[in-house]
Amino acid sequence: MIDAAVNIITISNETASLSVDLYGGGIVDFHLLADHINPLTFKLEPEDMPEHNRSGASYRGHFICLGRWGPPSAGEVKAGIPDHGQAANMIWEHATSTQNQLRMQVTTPLEGLKIERTIKLDDKSAVFKVDERITNVNPLSRLYNVVQHPTLAKPFLTNDTIVNCNADEGFNYKLSTKPLEHVAKWPYGIMEDGGTMNVSKADKPYSSVFSYIIKKDAKFGWITAYTPKYNLLFGYLWRRGTYPWISLWQDFDNDIIRYRGLEFGTTGMHKPYKQIIDEGNHQVFGEASYLYIDAGETQEKSYAGFMIKAPGGFIEVSDISMVNGKLTVTETGGRQINIKTTLSV
């Protein structure tokens, strides 16, 4: 179903509905038909966007940072490059869609990257898969990054929302010039005053971004958010080799959490490439801070998302896997929740 007036495309099955806004390309709604609670209600008003992004789309829901994660350099700003790259700032082309699948694409002329995206919602379950083909359409090779930027907001997001993931070592981006001097193990993060906080539960009203590598022996990377008020568990799963970094953005308005980013991607460095290179952070914890894509080269990436009503007595997630037509969520304590699906990553 397409709403031409607002560029919204919706796909659905008997359990769930998913909507994409072509203006910016973000997944802006994903909910169970039984309760209509959408975790991806995040939207910045134009005046709250970075100054050099305001002529295009505002950040909404789950958008993609393509080409870069974070701000461009001073020269790139003058050339018209927005924060997080052009893909989240442009109108995407709708290719085709069916009841539970859509294809869309965009070419970013300044970044020189084309992305072709297919989103498939499972035939029955509240599980979806996203496949993305990224092509360098310019005659020169370049450094680039891809970061998936799902962002939670109210009503799903509350101060009681719990975030779980299989992260390992990490750092606060406000201390990222020398990240190895400020290392914390998930679920903890080091603040600027030297204190620590539990990033899983956001137990202190501190606004920042904490970036972690995924455990090196993991087959998959995963991240979930559980809100007890609605008894809803929302999450993502992907191959670790595709996206080895998890970044948690938290934004507070006084003592109330306002936004919570469940970001995963190819870098933990939220800054221009020149700054990354000048600071010597080509790699952190043995993981690269950027990718290389040759002229004309295509690279493929994918991930899955899901939502379930949690069973009685649910506390937290300890592991997630997706094998042989089954997505398995393992709780703390060992109980498993199995979701049948025709999709895989």
Image (cartoon, grey):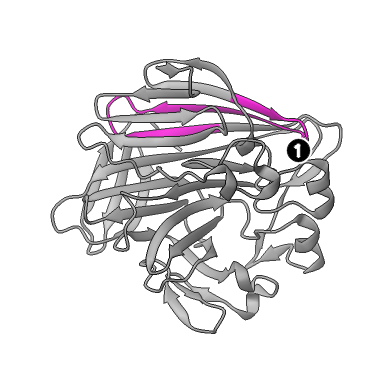
In this view, the residue in front, 339 or 96, is 96
Looking at the picture, how far across and down is residue 85, in whole percent?
Answer: 68, 43
Can residue 137 be seen in the rendering of this structure?
Answer: yes
Residue flagged by tag 1: what amino acid is it? Glu
Mark 1 crowdedness (10 Å alpha carbons): few <14, some 14-19, many ≥20? many
Residue 120 on the magenta segment: yes
Q: Residue at x 38, y 21 (%)?
A: 100
Q: Residue at x 79, y 38 (%)?
A: 294
* Residue 97, above or below 83: above
Is residue 282 shown left or right of residue 4? right
Looking at the picture, how far across and down is residue 220, in whole percent?
Answer: 46, 50
Q: Main secondary structure of the magenta part?
A: strand
Q: Residue at x 74, y 56 (%)?
A: 272
Is residue 249 shown left or right of residue 290? left
Magenta span? 105-131
What is the quadrant of residue 56 in the picture? top right
Residue to which mark 1 is pinned: 111
Can residue 325 be seen in the rendering of this structure?
Answer: no
